[in-house]
Image: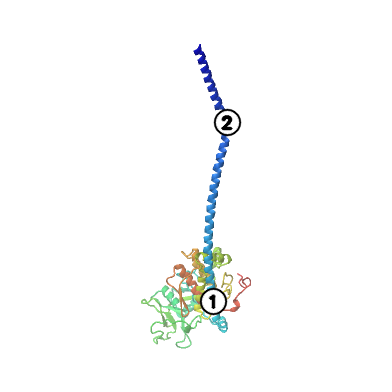
Amino acid sequence: MGITILRCLLHTESNQRSTDILVDEAMDSEYHQFEAPHGSSVRREQKFTIEKGMKKIVVSVLYGVLVLLLLILLMVTGIKFSQLNKEVTDVKLHLDRISHRIPSSASSSALHTDGAKPVQEVLLSSLVPVRGMCREGWVSFQTSCYLLSRAAATWRKAEEQCRRDGAHLVVLNNVEEVDYISKIVDISVNYWIGLVERDHEDHWSWVDGTDFTSTQAFWDDGQPDNWDYRENGEDCGQLHASEKRKRKLWNDADCNLPYRFICEKRLSLTPYKSKLTKIQYFLTVAMNLKTSLLLLVLTVCTVSGAQLPKALWQFGLMIECTQTDVSALKYNDYGCWCGFGGQGTPRDEADACCRTHDECYYTARRAPGCTAIADLPYILSYKFTCSNQQVTCSDINSKCQAAVCECDRVAAHCFAQSPYNPENKNLDPKVHCVN
């Protein structure tokens, strides 16, 4: 009986404990049911706060780096602009000294020069090939187009044939032209040139009216000899065939004998429209340093070491090399093409020099390997020498430098050989330069 009662008590206590455990677990379950969301929210807030703090730190670091880079860029820009300003000042002082060095009477006479020879200096086709300037079958060099005949004719017939093509027998004005012609002709063939003896013996003249005594002569040894064996004498000039030397020299010959000949005509200042698209015309205009492009060039100068004043200064020095008593500034804002920008028809030969110069720059800019921003003709410096009013570009120039140097050299000699009209200075382009 006692044992039974004890067992009942133990069973009752066990049930009570089980009930208490179940109650506790139920209460804990209810408690945690309400507690869990709150704890999760706290943890999420803590995680969000940490992530937000990290983002702020990263953003702050990036801003700091950006500010540092901007400060460095600002310092570099300031230094470069300081150098740019110094070089501009040097250029102004240099040109001012030249202007003050020229007496007013000399300047006035220089502005009214008459009888200047036609332009005969421009780019080497091997460096800056001219596109669309000469008719098909003709070759270009300096400011001329040349045609080598395949058939032979007397001197007079040859000149007539050239005239029908709007040209004349070739007139050789300088050693560069002689050497170029010597390279393109058949070395074993004689060619008529535009040299003729008129009126009386030993009075030679060029067919285009150029004064023979003003150009360098390239007679072969013992020439001219006016060989008496010929019934009609020897009154016409020709390039003498020679396989022993590179340069073709002159010989006087009987004008009635048939020889092949070389025609020459001025390089067209206006490219043939059939060979240029509207896009190319637009690019040609864009290359004339309008306001937006000028700003771009100035920016490039800052990055590339402020070369713009040096490049322009070199061009100015070339002009003053070929004209020792003239300031290069007189060609600034002259006609419709000299200066920044260009449009319309050139006012005179000097203005045409500027247009040809712009076209030369345009071609140089598009040459393979010379299309980088640092190769812009307006900022590219080069090496050259000046001797006896003749400019020579250095052989150490790179391909791009050589092309730009040749453009500037040709323009400088072009100015020297072209009349200057002060009435074409500071023209209103809207009135005088309408396309």
- Residue 428, given in percent of the width and then of the height, sits at 62, 73
Is residue 132 visible to us here? no
Q: Quadrant of residue 99?
A: bottom right
Label 1, secondary structure: give it. Answer: helix
- Residue 95, given in percent of the width and then of the height, sits at 54, 76
- Which residue is nearer to you in this view: 410 or 324? 324
Q: Residue furthest bottom?
A: 200
Q: Quadrant of residue 337?
A: bottom right
Task: Report the disc number at residue 354.
Answer: none
Q: Residue at x 50, y 12 (%)?
A: 2
Question: Tag 1: Cα neighbours inside 10 Å, few (<14), some, or many (≥20)?
Answer: some
Q: Quadrant of residue 336?
A: bottom right
Amino acid, disc 1: Leu
Sequence-first disc among 2 and 1:
2
Q: Residue furthest right?
A: 431
Q: How many marks?
A: 2
User: Which label lies toward us, 2 or 1?
Assistant: 2
Q: Residue at x 56, y 25 (%)?
A: 23
Label 2, secondary structure: give it. Answer: helix
Residue 220, relative to residue 30: is it above or below?
below
- Which residue is nearer to you in this view: 99 or 170? 99
Q: Which residue is mark 2?
A: 31
Question: Tag 2: Cα neighbours inside 10 Å, few (<14), some, or many (≥20)?
Answer: few
How far apart are labels 2 and 1 at the CA level? 95 Å
- Residue 314, given in percent of the width and then of the height, sits at 50, 73
- Residue 382, given in percent of the width and then of the height, sits at 47, 71
Q: Name the colouring of the figure.
A: rainbow
Amino acid, disc 2: Tyr
Horizontal arrangement in the rendering, residue 186 relative to residue 3 (left or right): left
Q: Residue furthest top?
A: 1
Q: Which residue is mark 1?
A: 95
Horizontal arrangement in the rendering, residue 41 relative to residue 179 (left or right): right
